[in-house]
Image: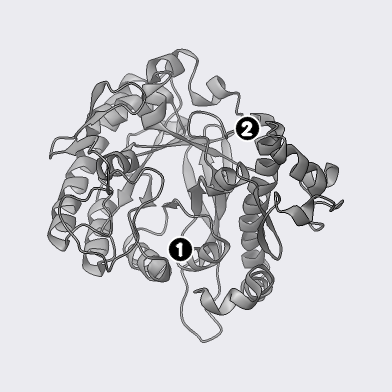
Amino acid sequence: MVDRGETADFGFTVENRLADAPDGSSRLGRVGTITTPHGEIHTPAFIPVGTKATVKAVLPESVKDLGAQAVLANAYHLYLQPGAELIDLAGGLSKFMGWPGPTFTDSGGYQVLSLGAGFKKILSMDATTVRSDQVIAEGKERLAQVDDEGVTFKSHLDGSMHRFTPEVSMRVQHHIGADIIFAFDECTTLLNTRRYQERSLVRTQLWAERCVAEHQLLTAQRSHRPYQALFGVVQGAQYEDLRREAARGLAGLELDGFGIGGALEKANLGTIVRWVNEELPEDKPRHLLGISEPDDFFVAIANGADTFDCVTPSRVARNGAVYRSDGRFNVTASVNRRTFEPIDPECTCYTCENYTRAYLHHLFKAKEMISSTLATIHNEHFIVGLVDRIRESIIEGQFDDFKDDFLGKYYGPRLGERVV
């Protein structure tokens, strides 16, 4: 980390710890506070995704009102449009998008995978499928080529060719100006061979070292800007030795925190998060990338994850899928045409306090744009609020009771199918 003197304005403190499980097994969960130049993040916390400097369909003011403490934008997308230099001229991401709180940017490493393997928004999580070094989705072309120095990729917007290296990723993210940025990494799939996972792990470690060096150089050069915290990303798929090796390697670098990324099967989520967090230093925050299912939060938090992000709450909202205390349902279903009650009577979000299911049903059927706005406000409020309630349950010593009560209602008869 760069010596920032008294102007550091970034840190992490642990304030409470999750008690051991009822069966006596130890747990790594904790409550803490991340301090950034744009404010505090009380953890555990869910961070809504604003890929292109916006949570789709929702005003920044509404994102704040629904309870979000921070937002995460995508360096790859902002690099392509409108360009990182323009955001720098605007004064950084927070000023550019009119968001008053803390911000994150991911490095573009996920896009390396999705473009290279052709899976787009969904990664293959089927570990039983035949594995290979060159994974590509059926009927897709490879838009990114990885080598030890970086990645050459074709823009999904106009077909132009670009080159990302660890140094380029750091420069792009420094120009974007988020409070928390991530080291450039290669994200693999479960379909890659063990041999490829091993090579990729070495590559990601070397890239992280290069990111640290470039980050320190840019921080010194750009002292007129607030300090940006750099997180390394732990890969290793579902291999315990690789995950632990990756975590130990990153723990030895001058990083401010850590991301836990990569492909994994849902049933192994808690186990893998625990492997990683047993190796990482306790005094630095840990961000679990791409998680938003309610049962996953309880598992990941119990095993030491502090913050989360995922596009799912806003994405499914735009298709009419909404959350409520007894599970997710589709508001466009015919039964809601004459249902003059809120999505969730227990919810206090703007949407539920002012609109009915019948109205949302009408908006979606009429293809009115506001349908996405109202559904997204509700879904993000629901997920942000759930993680906030988990945080409070840890403080109050009621984590297990809250978990059993919430998941019992949300999944109902399906609870036995979930790993909780």
Name which of mark 2 and mark 1 comes first in the sequence. 2
Q: With respect to residue 22, does 130 lie above or below?
A: above
- Image point (17%, 60%), residue name: 193
Q: Position of residue 244 (x, y in %)?
A: 26, 64
* Residue farthest bottom in this picture: 23
Q: Position of residue 159 (x, y in %)?
A: 28, 23
Left-right relation of 82 to 420: left
Number of the label disc, if any, that sits on residue 304: 1
> In the rendered structure, which amino acid carries the disc numbered 1?
Gly
- Crowding near pointer 1: few (<14 within 10 Å), some, many (20+)? many
- C-alpha distance separating marks 2 and 1: 32 Å
Could you say which quadrant of the image residue 191 lies in?
Answer: bottom left
- Image point (38%, 44%), residue name: 256
Q: Position of residue 113 (x, y in %)?
A: 28, 44
| Secondary element at image label 2 | loop
- Crowding near pointer 2: few (<14 within 10 Å), some, many (20+)? some
Q: Position of residue 225 (x, y in %)?
A: 44, 22
| Secondary element at image label 1 | loop
Nearer the observer, 398 or 186? 186
> In the rendered structure, which amino acid carries the disc numbered 2?
Ala
Q: With respect to residue 265, does 381 lie above or below?
A: above
Quadrant occupied by the N terminus: top left
Residue with the mark numbered 2: 57
Q: With respect to residue 411, does 360 lie above or below?
A: above
